[in-house]
């Protein structure tokens, strides 16, 4: 979660209204009572206890008080009623209130961004998704499935429930993400942030915004974890704990994948330490999305992931106990001391000592932290050959495309983008055995990539259709959709037309029969890619 401006928490509520009466009288006592109610309501809202927050504001007995109005607007904003929240804050007297500035800015941005949006609901699952663009509606079934499974896993691991409905907004771009959440636009661009959990919802950019999407399902699970941690701790959890838990949970809702530990977070941290990109856990700033570079953000995410895993290794209830303790304090070091017997400094020292005992391994240049790029000239040549091969493939010249790809060093084909491209070219050249060799084993590539999985699925399905073998393609297509949902191969479970200048040959196997939700995603992918 990207917390831009942390606020003081209402520990004043523990003092009680009566204590204020000892030091003030008349109007001062009344103002103190209202202030206390407002602070309690704010904390309840941040914990998604909206009915309790509203009752607290009712008890304040001052419906026109600017601070009370701001908190009512905050509740409406959390519920997704952006227009109502913005309207509440339009009065000049309220606009001058300090606490109104952030809420008002978000409410106005949210109202603009969600105007004429499309709302999809699954009342049984307790999920609501607003789509800024109608073309993204085909994601809804996959989102519901992910939310249901992720909520179950997070509740099990962290010991919480999720208030219903779970609210998600899918926006077109980083600019809209910024106005909806308060994350500075420059920060979103610098670190490549695609989702934020704040204001009672998950706001995420459409996978269509990237060339081949991004791991949107794991990202959704990551952001749901932020909402859960905020609810449990009343938003007291420090950044390292928030992000470490989110990374820890983002893949636990599904079976383990071959790229979950490739590379390990420890390998990234060790390389980050060598390059002096690491930071102390309590000095990460207000948001990892606001770090100065994608490399710095990657190292920081790996730091907190590795650290939280070490905490979790202490026992199955360690994280639950720590989170429960954080509901009563903003001092994470004190909470660690109480739940584990060691404070943050001791834990950090022990973790860094343990890190030095871990194998460094060779971190591929693909991840951007190594200096062994082979020279800018080699990189430029690789890009040129790959791009020319892609253009030749699009124009139905696979043999010429293979000549271009042969000019690239073989070890470079550990990069999944290149290997997926070569497999597609082999497939178009009717060299199915070579194509299968390029996508058969995840160990041959260094990271997950939607089109790589999609080509794999197409080949597996073709082999089953033609040879009568068992169809093992569905897991590959599921992985492809989880990363590149609007790729035609991913969504439609078949190879797309590969020629812009010649008629498409008869398909090697009949088009698959798709269920309604998959068919909707296929149609959206074809529309997005201008495929008939």
Image (cartoon, rainbow, N blue to C red):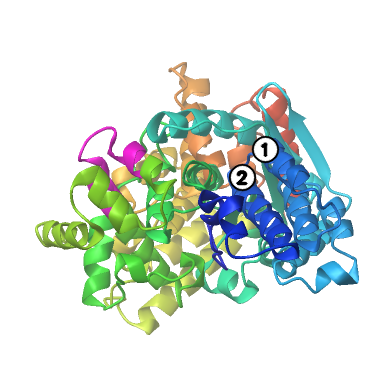
Category of crowding for the residue at label 1, using alpha-carbon neighbours closer than 10 angstroms: few (below 14), some (14–19), many (at least 20): some
**In percent of the image, x 27 and y 32: which residue is there?**
316
Front-lying residue, 390 or 20: 20
Q: Mostly what secondary structure, the magenta segment?
A: helix
122 shown above or below 218: above
**Do the residues under discs 1 and 2 have CB atoms within 8 angstroms?**
yes
**In percent of the image, x 39 and y 64: which residue is there?**
298
407 shown above or below 354: below
Judge from the rendering whether residue 85 lies leftward or rightward of residue 154; answer left or right.
Answer: right
Indicate yes or no whether the magenta region holds residue 310: yes
Where are the magenta residues, as a range? 307-322
Indicate yes or no whether the magenta region holds residue 421: no
Q: Which numbered disc flags the more N-terminal residue, 1 or 2?
A: 2
Front-lying residue, 527 or 385: 527
The residue pinned by badge 1 equals: 52
Quadrant of the image occupied by residue 509:
top right
Circle count: 2
Judge from the rendering whether residue 161 lies leftward or rightward of residue 101; answer left or right.
Answer: left
Label 1: state its secondary structure. helix
Label 2: state its secondary structure. helix
Residue 262 visible in this rendered orientation of the protein: no
**In percent of the image, x 29 and y 64: which residue is there?**
364
- Tell me where residue 92 appears, x and y as whole percent: 89, 72
Which image quarter is the C terminus in?
top right
**Distance between mark 1 and mark 2 Cα atoms:** 7 Å
Judge from the rendering whether residue 393 lies leftward or rightward of residue 524; answer left or right.
Answer: left
Name the mark on residue 44: 2
């Amino acid at each position: 979660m990207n917390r831009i401006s942390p606020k003081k928490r209402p520990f004043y509520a523990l003092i009680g209204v009566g204590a204020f009466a000892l030091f003030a009288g008349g109007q001062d006592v009344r103002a103190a009572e209202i202030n206390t109610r407002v602070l309690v309501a704010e904390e309840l809202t941040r914990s998604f206890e909206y009915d309790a927050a509203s009752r607290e504001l009712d008890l304040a007995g001052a419906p026109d008080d600017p601070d009370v109005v701001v908190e009512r607007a905050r509740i409406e904003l959390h519920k997704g009623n952006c227009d109502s929240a913005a309207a509440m804050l339009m009065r000049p007297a309220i606009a001058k209130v300090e606490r109104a500035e952030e809420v008002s800015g978000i409410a106005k941005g949210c109202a603009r961004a969600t105007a004429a949006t499309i709302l999809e609901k699954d009342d049984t699952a307790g999920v609501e998704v607003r789509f800024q663009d109608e073309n993204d509606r085909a994601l809804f079934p996959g989102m519901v499935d992910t939310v249901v499974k992720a909520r179950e896993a997070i509740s099990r691991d962290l010991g919480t429930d999720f208030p219903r409905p779970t609210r998600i907004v899918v926006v077109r771009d980083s600019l809209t993400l910024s106005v909806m959440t308060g994350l500075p636009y420059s920060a979103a661009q610098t670190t490549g942030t695609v989702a934020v959990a704040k204001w009672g919802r998950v706001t995420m950019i459409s996978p269509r915004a990237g060339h081949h999407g991004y791991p949107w399902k794991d990202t959704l699970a990551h952001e749901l974890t932020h909402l859960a941690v905020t609810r449990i701790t009343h938003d007291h959890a420090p950044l390292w704990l928030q992000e470490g838990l989110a990374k820890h949970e983002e893949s636990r809702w599904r079976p383990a994948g071959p790229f979950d530990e490739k590379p390990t977070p420890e390998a990234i941290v060790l390389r980050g330490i060598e390059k002096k990109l690491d930071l102390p856990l309590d000095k990460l700033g207000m948001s990892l999305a606001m770090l100065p570079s994608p490399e710095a953000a990657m190292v920081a995410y790996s730091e907190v992931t590795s650290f939280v895993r070490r905490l979790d290794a202490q026992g199955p209830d360690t994280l639950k106990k720590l989170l429960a303790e954080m509901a009563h304090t903003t001092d994470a070091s004190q909470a660690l001391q109480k739940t584990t017997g060691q404070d943050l400094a001791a834990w950090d020292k022990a973790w860094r000592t343990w890190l030095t005992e871990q194998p460094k391994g060779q971190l591929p240049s693909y991840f951007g932290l190594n200096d062994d790029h082979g020279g800018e000239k080699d990189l430029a040549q690789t890009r040129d050959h790959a791009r020319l091969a892609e253009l030749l493939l699009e124009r139905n010249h696979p043999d010429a495309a293979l000549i271009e790809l042969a000019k690239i060093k073989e070890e470079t084909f550990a990069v999944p983008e290149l290997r997926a491209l070569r497999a597609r070219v082999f497939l178009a050249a009717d060299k199915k055995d070579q194509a299968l060799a390029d996508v058969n084993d995840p160990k041959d590539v260094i990271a997950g990539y939607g089109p790589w999985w999609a080509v794999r699925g197409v080949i597996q399905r073709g082999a089953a259709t033609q040879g009568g073998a068992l169809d093992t393609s569905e897991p590959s297509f599921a992985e492809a959709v989880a990363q590149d949902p609007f790729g035609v191969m991913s969504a439609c479970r078949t190879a797309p037309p590969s020629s812009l200048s010649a008629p498409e040959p008869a398909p090697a196997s009949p088009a698959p029969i798709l269920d309604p939700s998959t068919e909707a995603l296929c149609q959206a992918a074809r529309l997005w890619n201008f495929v008939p």
